[in-house]
């Protein structure tokens, strides 16, 4: 599977999961809140913070009815439109420069999702390191083509899509000579229900396309991201807010600053727990193995020169005596010294037997 770099971060199997804090429209048009969202991402040690770059009049027809779940969240009237919602949640374009600079000062990567070609041109002024294509834009090939032509990584969210839809979008990207893609499994509901998450799709996308795969998660809380990391997600995108009670379409299912800290910590713990696929005695287990496993010990006091009989041997803990399967080799040998009851046995306690004798006996 490919490994894709965004800035200094490598994304793919064998690398830490990339945590993308989605500020989205949760700034409510307020530059101060936008900076607080950046602060939250920094405090949680997320890898990047992401906003959204759009103009309402280039995104929705003014005749588009407001989606039912947004209508309930926004307590909007029957005549409210999606244009009204998007217009109210725009990030003023003049805010980009101070937010890019603030992110740089705070030491976190700044990203933004463009929603049309002009947004890509605008974000290029700030040399953003990658472009996220939202699930709603999966069939917006002019936008995808424009982002791909920059040569920068394209993070392609796949909500509402089939494998065929994804392949078409990938073909557009590859046609521009760009093969730097990260796919995001996504369920485009707000919030998504547990039974709709279908996290096994993460592995399906990896097998089908060979790119790093993550998840853009719209469920409340951090349970889904933790499971996603455990089954191999390479990137987690999660909405963040400074206060879930604020008005707006995304606050109520977003993570608070403390939630985001918990997500990052949990993701790193899951990665540590996954560890290596190789089954072995770990370094941490070695002391327990020495004490807790069984080995051969003296069943009674044995004098020097005695001929060893089965009744002289016992199998007990600790595990640093001779291995238990060697008891037959010791039978009939002579002891070199007095051996106390319960003393773990070693080769130097016996004459004629041991590794050298064992080899010569089998050779004969």
Image: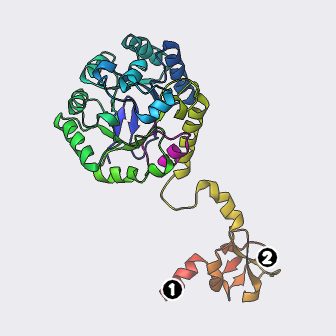
Of residues 329 and 237, which is closer to you in this image?
Answer: 237
Quadrant in the picture for residue 339: bottom right
Of residues 330 and 37, which is closer to you in this image?
Answer: 37
Q: Which residues are magenta?
A: 216-237
Question: Alpha carbon of mark 1 to alpha carbon of mark 2: how far?
Answer: 28 Å
Instruction: Relative to 288, say whether 358 is above or below.
Output: below
Looking at the image, residue 127 sits to the left or right of residue 290; the answer is: left
Residue to which mark 2 is pinned: 339
Q: Residues within 10 Å of mark 1 (few under 14, many from 20)?
A: few
Helix or strand or loop: what does disc 1 sit on? helix
The figure's colour scheme reads rainbow
**Marking on residue 318:** none
**Residue at 58% over, 57% down:** 282
Looking at the image, residue 249 sits to the left or right of residue 328; the answer is: left
Across and down, in percent, residue 93 comes to 36, 13
Instruction: Relative to 172, say whether 30 is above or below.
Output: above
**Residue at 62% over, 80% down:** 326
Residue 163 in view of the camera:
yes
Residue to which mark 1 is pinned: 362
Across and down, in percent, residue 89 comes to 43, 20
Looking at the image, residue 91 sits to the left or right of residue 280; the answer is: left
Of residues 244 and 34, which is closer to you in this image?
Answer: 244
Helix or strand or loop: what does disc 2 sit on? loop
Quadrant in the picture for residue 129: top left
Residue 55 in view of the camera:
no
Q: Residue furthest left?
A: 175
Magenta segment: does it hold 69?
no
């Amino acid at each position: 599977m490919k490994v894709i770099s965004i800035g200094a971060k490598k994304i793919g199997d064998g690398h830490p999961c990339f945590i993308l804090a989605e500020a989205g429209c949760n700034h409510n048009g307020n530059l101060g809140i936008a900076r607080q969202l950046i602060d939250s991402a920094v405090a949680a040690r997320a890898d990047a913070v992401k906003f959204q770059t759009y103009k309402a009049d280039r995104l929705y027809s003014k005749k588009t009815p407001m989606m039912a779940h947004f209508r309930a969240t926004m307590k909007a009237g029957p005549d409210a439109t999606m244009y009204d919602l998007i217009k109210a949640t725009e990030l003023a374009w003049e805010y980009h420069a101070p937010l890019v600079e603030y992110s740089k000062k705070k030491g976190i990567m700044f990203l933004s999702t463009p929603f049309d070609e002009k947004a890509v041109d605008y974000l290029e002024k700030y040399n953003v390191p990658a472009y996220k294509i939202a699930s709603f834009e999966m069939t917006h090939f002019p936008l995808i083509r424009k982002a791909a032509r920059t040569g920068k990584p394209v993070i392609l969210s796949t909500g509402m899509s089939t494998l065929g839809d994804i392949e078409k979008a990938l073909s557009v990207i590859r046609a521009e000579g760009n093969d730097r893609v990260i796919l995001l499994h996504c369920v485009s509901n707000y919030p998504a229900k547990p039974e709709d998450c279908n996290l096994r799709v993460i592995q399906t996308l990896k097998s089908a396309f060979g790119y790093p795969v993550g998840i853009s998660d719209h469920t409340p809380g951090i349970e889904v991201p933790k499971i996603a990391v455990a089954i191999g997600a390479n990137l987690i995108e999660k909405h963040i807010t400074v206060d879930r009670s604020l008005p707006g379409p995304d606050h109520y299912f977003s993570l608070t600053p403390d939630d985001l800290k918990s997500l990052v910590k949990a993701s790193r713990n899951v990665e540590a727990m996954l560890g290596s696929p190789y089954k072995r005695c770990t370094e941490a287990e070695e002391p327990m193995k020495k004490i807790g496993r069984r080995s051969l010990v003296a069943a009674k006091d044995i004098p020097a020169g005695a001929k060893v009989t089965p009744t002289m041997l016992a199998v007990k803990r600790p595990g640093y005596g001779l291995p238990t399967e060697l008891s037959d080799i010791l039978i009939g040998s002579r002891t070199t010294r007095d051996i106390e009851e319960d003393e773990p046995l070693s080769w130097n306690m016996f004459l004629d037997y041991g590794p050298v004798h064992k080899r010569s006996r089998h050779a004969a």
